[in-house]
Image (cartoon, grey):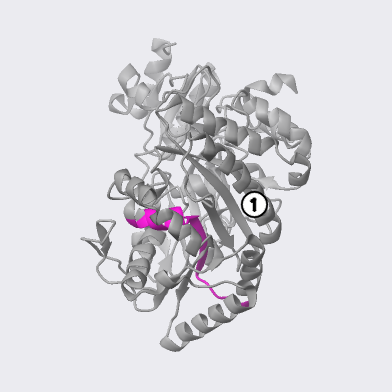
Amino acid sequence: MALQRDIYQIFTDIVGPENINEEAVILDGYTFNWLVEFNPGPGPGKYMDHRPEAVLLPGNVEEVQAIVRACNKHGVKYKAISTGYGSHGFPQQEGVILLDMKRMNRIIELDAKNKFAVVEPYVVWAQLEAEALKRGLFTTPVQAGSQASVLANVTSGWGMNVMGNHGGHNGRNCLGVEWVLPTGELLRLGPEEAWFCGDGPGPSLRGIMRGHCGAQGGMGVFTKVGIKLHHWPGPPELPTETGGLLTGYRLKKAPDNAKVVTPSFKDYDSMTEFLYLLGQAEVGYAVFRAGEPDHFLSIMAGAQSNKTVKEWHESGLVAEAVKNMPHPISVFLFGRSADEMAFHEKVLLKVLEESGGWIPEFTQNPLFADMRSNESILTLVANDTHFIHHGGGFVIAAGYQGTPASVIKHMGYPMERLKKKYIEEGNIVDDGLDSTYHNSFDNNSYVYMELEYHYDAADPESVNAARRCVTEERDNDREEKDGFEPNDIALCIGDYTKTLQERILDMGPHYGNFHIWQEKIKQAFDPQDASDRSNYGVGLLAKDL
């Protein structure tokens, strides 16, 4: 349904003719994305059901306000994206224009003394990291990759990150915010004329702005955000070169004061004890898991080709790695002196001894250890996600956040048993079972974990197997899981026979009727229902409340 010509002209007058488009070939480019094949329907496909009516590229906050006000006046819905990672970032109803924020890509301010940066929507993690490193600072990049938007992760979607043990969750790294409300009114959160604090005097709106998982574009448009930066003990630059042993690229020189250690554990209880003891000792710049042990190898092989990974599986290399390191976790150590590094290593070994963990022998081979530290540090800093696509597609079966003991209990053996069942069907990748993504925060006081399933996105049988697997996980042990905050509730993949909104309607009563409160907030802040509600709360099913 094309926009009326007079309305299209209004938008053209705001952004200029070169910054608006409604051609089908352009619009279709905005319907192709990750997880589209998980939308309900008779069979998987890679294009979303609804094209935007037009795509606009605003260049500043004034243009964003003018667009939003015009939408309110003329009954047009809108949604903004930054780098657009995932189908949840796009319209899932008719009559929506898309604001692609790629023209707003500036680092406005980087205050090294007070450790914060102010960025526009299209600044990506790699862009901010490069500038922060020069000043002895670092960011908390989302695991979606260094190409993802800083602002989107901090204000609008989730907030997990691999540097959380040192730097915290990005929901709390969010400082001052420039926010175009759903009506077009401009709101600044934080102290007047300053960006160093998340809240000014009076009540906080942070819970309404982003809550736990973010509003997914359903509550207006964020045009600037202040993000807290953190100490970086490494060098001001990390130049790379081609010729890495397996990845094809590596650091020219790994930092002398950095080391990655990958201990393993015989069971999840031992790993939990290790996390608590290590956190109490306050050791570990970053503590994370990246879908290992299968991904542990794939981090180094995946950039070359999926064929390499396949050969490693067929040769038995992955199976052997699983035997040697069934439940590994990576600990990134930084020492500001040789003595401090030696102390951290001694503490780590002592904690391993007390928790029953070990450092696999093959990881201590000098060649392997050097490669692991060099390329893993690069992967950690770059948040490289190439290694999670070696099956052709991946999906998150669950994402839970809480204490290590409570989360690992539900993300351990119960999930492995379920995953094994579907692997034996032959339609999802046998990746060693424990392909868990894990972020630790605040000295392991709480963790975020998700289990990944790898499937062939081009094979309907494989897609449907992954769909059924995720559905079964969501429906298992519901009573046990009450009380968790499911961090991926905005994705809410769940039962693939249901839409996102239907799933939330089902889940809401189990989580304090959050969906009813979200709808009340939506109506108060967006009386014209102009900001696309497709991925906010119950969305289009609000009438059923």
Q: Is residue 178 above or below residue 46?
A: below
Residue 384 or residue 22, whichever sits in front? 384
- Is the N terminus in the top left, top right, bottom left or bottom right quadrant? top left
Query: Where does the image place residue 55, in percent across and percent down from the top left?
Result: 38, 25
* Amino acid at dot 1: Tyr
Q: Which residues are magenta?
A: 280-300
How far from the left and from the top, in percent, is residue 227?
A: 50, 57
Is 80 on the left or on the right of 406, as rendered? left
**Image quadrant in which you'd find residue 51:** top left
In the rendered structure, does residue 295 fall within the stretch colored magenta? Answer: yes
Task: State the image coordinates of residue 373 (x, y, percent, origin top left).
Answer: 37, 69
Residue 489 counted in the magenta span: no
Classify residue 469 by image quadrant: top right
Q: Residues within 10 Å of mark 1 (few under 14, many from 20)?
A: some
Is residue 120 placed above or below 263 in the rendered structure? above
Q: Which residue is mark 1?
A: 413
Instruction: Classify 281 as above or below 384.
Output: below
